[in-house]
Image: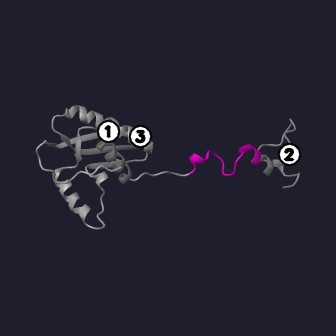
């Protein structure tokens, strides 16, 4: 640009306008690309990621014997034995609906006999909400819990529930 370019002319106070020269533009933003690097781009989180986090957090609660209904656990046991079985144990009994900033969860659990179902449900909600919000940054708007069964002490184990580390 030449000296006669109107963007390079000083104003009445003798200052060059901020957008006038390349040098002025470089020093005004301080960085190439402008803005905070953390705000450049978009992060999306798949439903399965939230389901896995919620499933693991729910299993950590004392009194939760298993996740999912008896039928889904049976199908899961068969699927786990088939090479290339798709759905992992961690997501069994969990359904998530994930939006851009919020998520809602439905959990199906089996509780141990003798525990307070209300206390277990409250602890599961707290643990799931804490884990999902901490790890994803999403707001958990609801955690619906369906207790599908109670594990009696003398019942045979349909499938050995494996704790995932």
Q: Are marks 1 and 3 in contact (CB under 8 Å)?
A: no
10 Å crowding of disc 3: few (<14), some (14-19), many (20+):
some
Q: Nearer the viewer, mark 3 or mark 2?
A: 3
For marks 1 and 3, the one nearer the N-term is 3
Residue at the farthest bottom position: 83
Q: Is residue 156 left or right of residue 90?
A: left
How many marks can you see?
3
Disc assigned to residue 9: 2
In the figure, residue 118 lies in which quadrant?
top left
Residue 114: assigned label: none
Mark toward the viewer: 1 or 2:
1
The correct choice, above or below, for 60 with respect to 122 in the image is: below
Q: Give me the disc on residue 142.
A: 1
Residue 18 image offset from top left, x and y in percent: 77, 43
Q: Is residue 29 magenta?
A: yes
Q: Is residue 23 left or right of residue 49?
A: right
Q: Which residue is mark 3?
A: 133
Q: Which residues are magenta?
A: 26-40
Measure the alpha-carbon separation of dots 3 and 2. Answer: 53 Å
Q: Secondary structure at mark 1?
A: strand
Q: Residue 126 versus residue 12: which sits nearer the camera?
A: 126
Classify mark 1: residues with Cα within 10 Å, few (<14), some (14-19) or many (20+). few
The percent position of residue 67, horizontal first and vertical second, equals 24, 47
Instruction: Judge the density around disc 2: few (<14), some (14-19), many (≥20) Cα neighbours within 10 Å.
Output: some
Q: Is residue 136 above or below residue 76?
A: above
> In the rendered image, is residue 21 in sight?
no
Residue at the outermost left position: 154
């Amino acid at each position: 640009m030449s000296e006669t370019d109107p963007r390079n002319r000083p104003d009445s106070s003798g200052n060059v306008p901020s957008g006038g020269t390349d040098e002025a533009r470089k020093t005004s933003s301080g960085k190439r690309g402008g803005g905070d690097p953390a705000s450049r781009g978009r992060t999306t989180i798949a439903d399965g990621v939230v389901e896995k986090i919620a499933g693991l957090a729910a299993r950590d609660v004392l009194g939760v014997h298993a996740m999912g209904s008896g039928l889904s656990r049976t199908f899961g046991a068969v699927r786990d034995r088939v090479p290339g079985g798709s759905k992992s144990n961690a997501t069994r009994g969990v359904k998530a609906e994930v939006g851009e900033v919020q998520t809602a969860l439905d959990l199906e659990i089996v509780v141990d006999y003798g525990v307070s179902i209300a206390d277990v449900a409250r602890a599961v909600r707290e643990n799931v909400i804490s884990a999902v919000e901490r790890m994803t940054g999403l707001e958990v708007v609801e955690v619906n819990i369906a207790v599908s069964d109670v594990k009696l002490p003398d019942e045979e184990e349909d499938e050995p529930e494996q704790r995932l580390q």
